[in-house]
Each structure stands twice: as C-alpha cells, then as structure tokens.
Amino acid sequence: MGNFFIMNYYCLIAGLPDIVEDTKTAIAVAELKHELQEQLSDADLQLLKILFAAYDNDNLLAFLKNKEAQLNSLGNLTSDDWSELILLMQESEKPKDARLLLYIQKFYTSISDEKFDTGGISQEDYLSSLYYEEAMQSKNEFLRSWFEFNLNLNNILTAIACRKHGFDQRALVVGNNEVANIIRQSNARDFGLGGMFDELDMILRIAEETDLLEREKKIDALKWKWLEDNTFFHYFSVEKVLAYVLKVQMIERWKFLSVENGTQVFRQLLDEFREGVSFE
C-alpha cells in the first residue's frame, strides 16, 4: 500500500507546474486543493486539512459576527457547516463530528463562557494560538516544525514591535512553547534566544527593515528558504506536497496583493527566491 501511494505522489509531484520557473501557468490554490483532495490518502488529507484550517479561522470569526458573511471558499467548512457545528457545540459539551477540529471546539467553548479571560489578546490571536498549538501536536514532523517555526517567527517580530512602541510583550506573545515563554521574560536584545535556532539573526535583521513591503518580502523569502531546507531530502512524499501548497499560497498572496503592483512585486519576489535574498 505504501508503494502505491509513493507512486501516486511521484506522478502528482512530477505533474505540478514549476511555480518558480513558469509563473504564467502557476496553479491556483483552489485548483491545487481540489486536485489534492482527489489524489492524497485519507491520512494525508487530514494533514492538508490542517493547512487549510487557516482559512477556517478567518471564516469562523466572520461567521460569528455575521451569519450572512461571504466566507473564503478555500476553507474546509462552508456556511452550512458552521451553522450545524455551532449548534452542535451549543448542545453538547463534547461534540463528535469529523469536520470539527479540537481547537475550534475549545475556542468556541471558551469565548461562550462569560467568565473567560483571553489574557489581553484579541479573539483572533487567541484562535491562532489554539490553531498553532494543535498543529504542533501533529504526528507529521514536517507539519509540527513548520508551525513552530512560524510561531517563533511571529512572536519574535511581535516582541520587537512591542519593545519599539512600548507595549507589554508578555500580553501579545502567543503560545506556550519554550521560545514564547523565554521571550515573555527576557529584556535582552535577542530575547535570550541566542543559539536556539538558525533563523534568529535573520529575523532580527528583517525586523530592522523600515519599508513594510520589503520586510514582508524578506519574511516570505525566509519562509520559502525554510521550506526548501526542510524538504531537501523529501522527494515524492506528502511533505513535498505540503511544502508545494504553502509555496503556492505564498505566491498567490503576492499576485493579488495589489492590482497596481501585484505582478511587479510577484516577479521581483521570484527573482529574489532564485538568487537568494540577502539579509546583510
């Protein structure tokens, strides 16, 4: 059975457009999601579901504010799904439904409790922290590492911004991993994280970038590099597929960033990916 799926992924990966070399035929995220849903194993579809749950987070918050809100179709769940699941969560303390990821249930139960305190962070950040927490418990090492890398990256950039503008970083840093806990307690320039992971110096230099567009580009370039490094020895596995999805999501975000400069930024970003972004 294992060899069957490896062959399937070989054909799948070999047939996907090269998103760096051929921008005109780069596959859309929606089209890619549909194709993968037809070709991945049931177990690997659950990994894909975690990636696309990021859209569910935005959709849930929008739906809770307005049941008629236009939801992002890239999410795993539709408006009808949300109506049914919210009713289920209201009626049962431990609802069982294959569509319902555990962190969604925990979030909804928490915010429905009048005595619940988010600790000063927004509902959006609280939901994100639960999402990352669940993803970092995945049985797939690549997925765990990807979410922890993003959590660390976001927390460091948040802490630097807090320090710059005089906010309390302890209230805005999310998650409970080792890096998050160290950041909350440290006043050192590197937040006491020196030597803990390779990307720290790059993140600190990116934070010094004053041009917001340029900074976003460098953040995505760093993420792209991480994906390349962490799938180098994965050839036709689900890890390669997941990394491809993340790259396509990144590219599509830049393509539609702006009607006026989206294409220009997109092509410049690809050139920098090819050459390697300088963080000096």
Image (cartoon, rainbow, N blue to C red):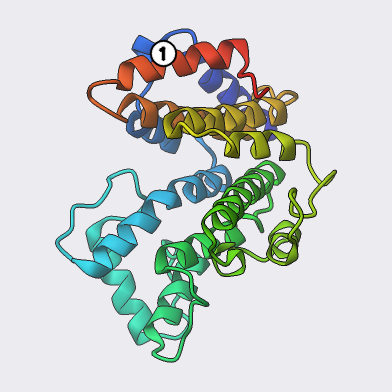
Residue 175 position in % (x across, y down): 62, 63
Image position of 140 with respect to 268: above or below: below
Of the 4 image quadrants, the one containing the N terminus is top right
Q: Is residue 19 visible?
A: no
Residue 102 position in % (x across, y down): 51, 68
Give the number of callouts.
1
Residue 25 occupies which quadrant of the picture? top left
**Amino acid at circle 1:** Arg
**Viewer-side residue, 125 vs 16:** 125
The residue that mark 1 highlights is 267
Of the 4 image quadrants, the one containing the C terminus is top right
**Viewer-side residue, 165 vs 5:** 165
Residue at image position (23%, 68%) is 65
Residue 176 occupies which quadrant of the picture? bottom right
Image position of 157 with respect to 96: above or below: above
Q: Is residue 268 visible?
A: yes
**Viewer-side residue, 105 vs 203:** 203
Residue 23 position in % (x across, y down): 39, 12
Residue extending furthest toward the bottom: 115
Residue 227 position in % (x across, y down): 63, 30
Residue at image position (30%, 28%) is 256
Residue 73 occupies which quadrant of the picture? top left
Residue at image position (51%, 56%) is 165
Q: Residues within 10 Å of mark 1 (few under 14, many from 20)?
A: some
**Viewer-side residue, 134 vs 45:** 134
Element class at badge 1? helix
